[in-house]
Image: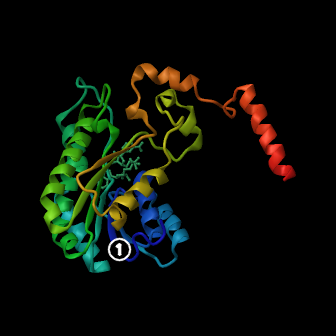
Amino acid sequence: MAGLLEDRVALVTGARQGLGRAITVAFVEAGAKVLALDESLDGMDETLRLSNEKDRRDRVRVVQLDLVDPASAGKAVEECIKHFGALHCLVNSAAVWFYLTLADLTVEDWDRLHAVNVRAPVFLAQAATAHLAAQAGGSIVNIASIQARVSGPGGVAYASSKAALVGVTRTMATELGPFGIRVNAICPGCFTEHEHRMRSRPEIPAYPLGRFGRPEEIASVAVFLASDAASFITGEAINVDGGTSALAPEYAAVVASSRAPAPVSLPRRIRSYARRRLRGSRSA
Ligand SMILES: NC(=O)c1ccc[n+]([C@@H]2O[C@H](COP(=O)([O-])OP(=O)(O)OC[C@H]3O[C@@H](n4cnc5c(N)ncnc54)[C@H](O)[C@@H]3O)[C@@H](O)[C@H]2O)c1
């Protein structure tokens, strides 16, 4: 991905950890400068350390803002322009996520979650529009979730916010397309940085690829969508979920049992033909 975002400037929210951190690091590796925003700076040192490992030119500036505050959108964009002089790409990765059933959900929980997951991306986009339009190839990438499409008990607030974000993505793509700004969403399945959690949870059978995702596997899609390599893609919401949303639940057990730990066993006739061919090629 090196060079795909050379000298672009990006604003990435939720950058102190998780997917936002991976996106920040991947953007730096691709050549971008990044304004890394979060409400807390706990963990931001690690984001900076990993970014500097990719590029030592101190390409990340950190800003601490609470996206629940309606004034934060304008402040973030202003800081970006003041420090870097431009803004080419906005990545909305910050989110609140909790699982509360209808019985337990409160108005306060609902409002806070929707303020961060939907309202903030909308008003950050509003604040960024003029600057994105001033650059060739302006782009917005919204990190949604497969819960925009499939969900489960306890997800009423989170899933509705992600479905709204996908709707916002489509609508903004139609409004901002004439200004040369592309707007896309990524719908991640389950992602973790921890290798043991990647393969050991009971939900794994629902992942045809046999594991959860690595944060870099979202970051590379975000780099692609932000870059000119995706110059004719807008209004799209791309599932990056190891195939889980493609799998009907009744097939989960079949997929799990057909996963071959050893190389797939070929019929004997094919194996002996392959061996003969191999011996032939060695003696030739
Ligand atoms: N990790 C996954 O498996 C997964 C799956 C589907 C979707 N997603 C989505 O991907 C995105 C990133 O997920 P993650 O795993 O990195 O989550 P995370 O919880 O690790 O990180 C979210 C970040 O948002 C920040 N944030 C929360 N409220 C904020 C506020 N008011 N102001 C500013 N920053 C705030 C947090 O401090 C945190 O750093 C989210 O939008 C999430 O919904 C993640």
* Res 42 seen here: no
| 68 sits left or right of 223 in the view | left
Residue in the image at 31% along x and 79% along y: 83
**Residue lying at 43% horizontally and 56% vertically, measured from the top left:** 219
Q: Position of residue 223 (x, y in %)?
A: 40, 61
Q: Which of 32 and 254 is in front in this view?
A: 254
Task: Using the rendered image of the protein, determine whether residue 172 is visible from the camera's viewpoint.
Answer: yes
Q: What element carries label 1?
A: loop
Q: Mark 1 points at which residue?
A: 8
* Residue 71 percent location from the top left of the image: 17, 62
In depth, the one of 106 and 238 nearer the eye is 238
Identify which amino acid the numbered label 1 is placed on: Arg
Residue 233 horizontal side relative to residue 31, left or right: left
Q: Residues within 10 Å of mark 1 (few under 14, many from 20)?
A: many
Taking 147 as reference, is 101 above or below it? Answer: above
User: Would you identify the image quadrant in which residue 36 lies?
Assistant: bottom left
Return the residue nearer the eye: 231 or 162. 231
Residue at 39% in and 33% down? 246
| Residue 125 x %, y % | 19, 61
Q: How is the image coloured?
A: rainbow
Q: In the rendered picture of this protein, how many numbered marks are placed on residues?
A: 1
Where 116 sits versus 189, above or below? below
- Work out whether residue 186 or residue 36 is closer to the camera in this orientation and state it: 186
